[in-house]
Amino acid sequence: MPATRHLPTSESEDLIALTREIAAKELAPRVDDAERTGAFPREVFATLGRAGLLTLPYPEEFGGGGQPYEIYLQVLEEIGAAWASVGVGVSVHALSCFPLFAYGTDEQRARWLPDMLSGERLGAYCLSEAHAGSDPAAMRAKAVRDGDSYVLNGAKAWTTHGGKADFYTVMARTSAEKSRGISCFHVPAGTPGLEFDAPEDKMGLMGSTTATVRLVDARVPADHLIGHEGQGLSIALAGLDAGRLGIAAVATGLAQGALDTAVAYAKEREAFGKAIIDHQGLAFVLADMAAAVESSRATYLAAARLKDADRPYGREASIAKLVATDNAMKVTTDAVQVLGGAGYTRDFPVERFMREAKVMQIFEGTNQIQRLVISRHLAR
């Protein structure tokens, strides 16, 4: 059954209804084939963009939806419930727009942001490197000033939409100073020297292309620097708080989808003369799954409301990411168990849900990093 939501306005109710309609008509019929073949659903992002769902948390003056995070994340959850790869892609796109919106000049925002928020252009976020995932300050990709340009060299790993995006938000080192030597750049697709490895052969999220981005003497104009030199790491970390909420919402949607599938199966499957949902041992498993999903939703919404109120929310974002993704792993695993042997086949989507849930505990900061962030807040 769909999630029960208490929405503040009729407009937000309409957004959820629109999202559910698009999920049913545009996402659900395509997800199985795309996830089996690894086909990148570029046209789906265009559909979401035309519906105004791709960039909801940004101001209307730039082409965004002007929605609070509380609403944006619930829309993102609905998308994630239908197709996790697309939900992750929407979250990554929103993250890739954040540096320009929050730190760009008025001229930069007027020049690039409307196209980025139109829904016709898709973004990628290049922070991690093969040896610098949980420790981004250890990155080695470099950007060297050369007259009116910067020349970028290096490799950025695990890039969602790598090779498919229309623009790349790239963090690169402009000085040897560890934490204050990183800068942020807007790099359009098609820039000479911007190259891509073959997509990663992943365990799940096959509809989300992930690839290493290589910068080989890639030259970008100096006015493509976002913020000032040395500000890149602080920009990246500020964006990650919002990105973690996006993943928490997608993970909650994924868990909701697994719960819905498990409940529907348990109502129809019979054992010992009655539906298996009427056997207490299994009914209690489903009850725990429902409690986990509701807890995840409440946790990310609590953090989103702090963000909407312009209050600090970094600790709460880490808690939401930790709780929602750990719960998604547990709920999807239990969904496979509820379906028994059928759950281990591709006749039902729960085996895919379980594979997709695993990476939720890894990206946007592993859950070990979330525990580190939370504990450091507690120690202050």
Image: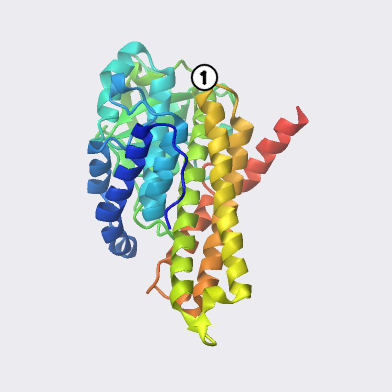
From the top left corner, tell me how far across and down residue 30 is, in percent: 27, 59
Q: Nearer the viewer, residue 219 or 259?
A: 259
User: What quarter of the picture does the C terminus occupy?
Assistant: top right
Residue visible at 49% across and 80% down? 341
Residue visible at 26% across and 33% down? 192
User: Please, is residue 328 above or below residue 352 in the view?
Assistant: above
* Residue 223 visible (yes or no): yes
Q: Amino acid at mark 1?
A: Gly
* Residue 126 visible (yes or no): no
Residue found at the very far right of the displayed protein: 379
Q: Quadrant of residue 7?
A: top left
From the top left corner, tell me how far across and down residue 145 is, in percent: 40, 18
From the top left corner, tell me how far across and down residue 208 is, in percent: 36, 51
User: Please, is residue 145 above or below residue 115 in the view?
Assistant: above
Residue found at the very far bottom of the displayed protein: 272
Residue that badge 1 annotates: 230
User: Please, is residue 126 above or below residue 100 in the view?
Assistant: below
User: Please, is residue 184 above or below residue 71 in the view?
Assistant: above
Secondary structure found at label 1: loop
Residue found at the very far top of the displayed protein: 106
Q: Nearer the viewer, residue 303 or 203?
A: 303
From the top left corner, tell me how far across and down residue 64 is, in percent: 32, 27
Residue visible at 32% across and 16% down? 108
Q: Nearer the viewer, residue 105 or 132?
A: 105
Q: Nearer the viewer, residue 205 or 54?
A: 54
Residue visible at 25% across and 38% down? 51
Q: How many marks?
A: 1
Q: Quadrant of residue 74?
A: top left
User: What quarter of the picture does the N terminus occupy?
Assistant: bottom left
Q: Is residue 204 left or right of residue 110?
A: right
Name the colour scheme: rainbow
